[in-house]
Image (cartoon, rainbow, N blue to C red):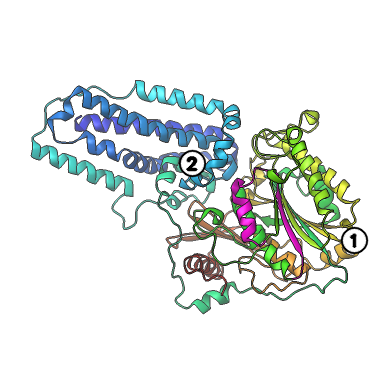
């Protein structure tokens, strides 16, 4: 194959990738409600740089084989081999981009190599996924058909190059491949975070393509040491938390139940939103309990939420802590903390045991018992299984209430619901009972809200109810339909509330908290310990009790960009130390606050260096 034909084939790929970007935009149109057409056009044009990088690196083997300065290259059999070398790998990468048309709505970023850490769960759900997203496979087939049909095939010049000239062209093509993959002659190669020049996560992901994010994270450990500060004491001083307790020990030992609602974005609620929402019972609890108005998840995936909520560990590297090689590092989780005060702890999740790595992590976090699908009564599984992930929320929450009634000691227990996870199953007897809403998830949100109501009805009749603090949050947000939440920080807003049947205890909680305070998932562990009057000194510094008298912060890491949210601002910084500050309410740029930037750097240095050195806990 001659040089001209090689260039034609690379050019045809550019057209295909541009088409894939158009389709990504159409499928995720609601994510771009708050941006203007000029920003969108810029994203498409700037995205060509990432398309070229992805195309040239994913076709590097084709380049090597196509331009070899040997006679056999012109043989028909070898040319046919080159066609398949062109078609097969590119068709696979087309699928990764097409899958993100829908998967992006769940995780808020392009897929990276880390997807293989949850591949077992995905394979178990393959039948359901195909049933729900068959049209993506159809699009893939059409794209492949167009790709193959219009592949440039005619060799304009069949003359075999002179060996020396051919060798020079071959070396030139390799050099060009490396140069384009790097994105130019700059010192550092093109990175994911460079796509976010418009300071908007959705536009950044529109600029990117999944081939690029997948290939550039294959060997991304994300744990290289950083040296923002030479003196580690300066790091400690910037992130040090007040660990004094704000509660005196209650004469009657209090229980704690943590309820993590799958995909319950803050925007799905009616409470304190300018619309009705889909959560009437959660709204009523929010009104009668203590509702935190500014809580942010530490990520966009369930696998990120569990370490954050139970162990104050956010994700500040590319890979979730649960699946990283550092998961066995020293840390102290909720179960271990409460065990010191003779509490029994448990973690409930109605999915298959081992799903998402929750069972193994719960053990590392010190939980005494784990309840998964294996522990659910065998005689009830056929009727209560949703045929996808696990047990429907209503029967599982009833089972949860009954299991708690078997405890003979004070307890701390977590439950993670699952019915509002794709494919959003609704039990047959409740079909048509809940509003369909504007997104596929809305009906299942209504069902889980109803299941939560039924749980409280049952729990309220149990002896332990009157001495129990309920902490309710969501693991992450999901499909966006409301323009007011289509913002860089709106994509992380989740509910966080407390409820206690004893009005005296609830009033005490209300008196000690500023409900407008910025807070996050990593604040839940120290908050629980504070409420139970358990020493917090060994809690990691990524979270603090919400009862502390300050404005609070929240953080997350996505697509190579770190974000620190404070009372009025949020700061974004990439690994090249480029940072920008925005107004939290308007999302408009403002002058950088060096104190906030220094604090963010300190968190990153403590987190990443501590992972490598296993030095979080001395």
Which quarter of the rendered picture does the N terminus lie within?
top left
Which range is magenta?
341-366
Cβ atoms at labels 2 and 1 below 8 Å apart: no
Q: Please provide percent x and percent y for residue 292.
A: 75, 58
- Numbered disc in front, either 2 or 1: 1
Q: Residue 385 appears in which quarter of the rendering? A: top right
Q: Residues within 10 Å of mark 2 (few under 14, many from 20)?
A: many
Q: Is residue 303 above or below residue 223?
A: above
Number of disc labels: 2
Depth check: give the residue in front, 581 or 3. Answer: 3
Q: Please provide percent x and percent y for residue 456.
A: 85, 48
> Disc 1 marks which residue?
502
Q: Please provide percent x and percent y for residue 586.
A: 62, 53
Label annotation for residue 428: none
> Disc 2 marks which residue?
206
Which quarter of the rendered picture does the C terminus lie within?
bottom right
Q: Is 364 colored magenta in this rendering?
A: yes
Residue at horizontal 87%, vertical 47%? 458
* Circle 2: element type: helix
Q: Is residue 102 left or right of residue 144?
A: right
């Amino acid at each position: 194959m001659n040089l001209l034909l090689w260039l034609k084939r690379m050019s045809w790929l550019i057209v295909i990738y541009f088409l894939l970007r158009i389709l990504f935009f159409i499928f995720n149109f609601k994510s771009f409600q708050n941006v203007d057409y000029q920003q969108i056009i810029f994203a498409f044009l700037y995205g060509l740089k990432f398309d070229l990088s992805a195309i040239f690196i994913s076709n590097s083997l084709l380049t090597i084989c196509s331009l070899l300065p040997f006679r056999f290259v012109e043989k028909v059999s070898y040319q046919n081999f080159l066609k398949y070398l062109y078609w097969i790998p590119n068709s696979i990468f087309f699928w990764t981009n097409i899958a993100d048309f829908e998967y992006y709505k769940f995780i808020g970023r392009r897929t990276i190599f880390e997807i293989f850490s949850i591949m077992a769960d995905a394979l178990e759900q393959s039948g359901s996924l195909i049933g729900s997203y068959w049209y993506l496979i159809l699009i893939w087939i059409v794209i492949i058909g167009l790709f193959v049909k219009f592949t440039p095939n005619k060799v304009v010049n069949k003359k075999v190059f002179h060996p020396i000239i051919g060798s020079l062209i071959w070396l030139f093509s390799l050099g060009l491949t490396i140069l384009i993959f790097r994105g130019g002659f700059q010192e550092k190669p093109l990175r994911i975070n460079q796509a976010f020049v418009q300071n908007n996560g959705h536009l950044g992901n529109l600029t990117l393509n999944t081939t690029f994010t997948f290939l550039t994270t294959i060997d991304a450990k994300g744990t290289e040491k950083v040296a923002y500060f030479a003196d580690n004491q300066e790091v400690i001083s910037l992130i040090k938390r007040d660990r004094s307790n704000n509660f005196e020990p209650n004469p009657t030992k209090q229980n704690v139940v943590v309820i993590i609602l799958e995909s319950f974005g803050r925007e799905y609620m009616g409470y304190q939103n300018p619309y009705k929402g889909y959560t009437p019972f959660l709204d009523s609890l929010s009104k009668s309990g203590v509702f935190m108005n500014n809580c942010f998840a530490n990520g966009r995936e369930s696998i990120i939420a569990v370490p954050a909520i139970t162990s104050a560990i956010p994700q500040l590297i590319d890979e979730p802590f649960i699946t990283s090689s550092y998961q066995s590092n020293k840390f102290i989780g909720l179960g271990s903390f409460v065990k010191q005060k003779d509490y029994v702890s448990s973690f409930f999740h109605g999915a298959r045991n081992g799903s998402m790595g929750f069972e193994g992590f719960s053990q590392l976090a010190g939980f005494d018992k784990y309840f998964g699908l294996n522990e659910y009564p065998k005689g009830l599984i056929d009727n209560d299984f949703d045929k996808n992930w696990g047990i429907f929320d209503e029967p599982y929450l009833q089972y949860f209430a009954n299991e708690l009634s078997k405890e003979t000691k004070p307890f701390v227990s977590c439950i993670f619901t699952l019915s509002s996870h794709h494919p959003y199953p609704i039990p047959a007897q409740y079909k048509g009972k809940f509003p369909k809403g504007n997104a596929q998830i809305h009906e299942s949100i209504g069902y889980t809200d109803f299941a939560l109501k039924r749980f409280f009805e049952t729990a309220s009749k149990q002896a332990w109810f009157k001495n129990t603090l309920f902490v309710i949050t969501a693991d992450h947000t999901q499909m966006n339909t409301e323009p007011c939440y289509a913002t860089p920080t709106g994509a992380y807003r989740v509910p966080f509330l407390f409820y206690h049947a004893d009005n005296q205890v609830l009033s005490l909680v209300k008196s000690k908290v500023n409900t407008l305070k910025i807070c996050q998932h990593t604040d839940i562990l120290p908050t629980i310990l504070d409420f139970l009057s358990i020493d917090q000194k060994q809690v990691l510094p990524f979270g603090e009790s919400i009862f502390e008298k300050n404005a609070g912060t929240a953080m997350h890491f996505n697509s190579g960009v770190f974000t620190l949210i404070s009372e009025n601002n949020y700061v974004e910084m990439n690994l090249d130390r480029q940072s920008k500050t925005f107004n939290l309410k308007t999302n408009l740029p403002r002058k950088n606050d060096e104190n906030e930037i220094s604090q963010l750097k300190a968190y990153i240095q403590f987190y990443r260096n501590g992972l490598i050195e296993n030095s979080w806990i001395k």
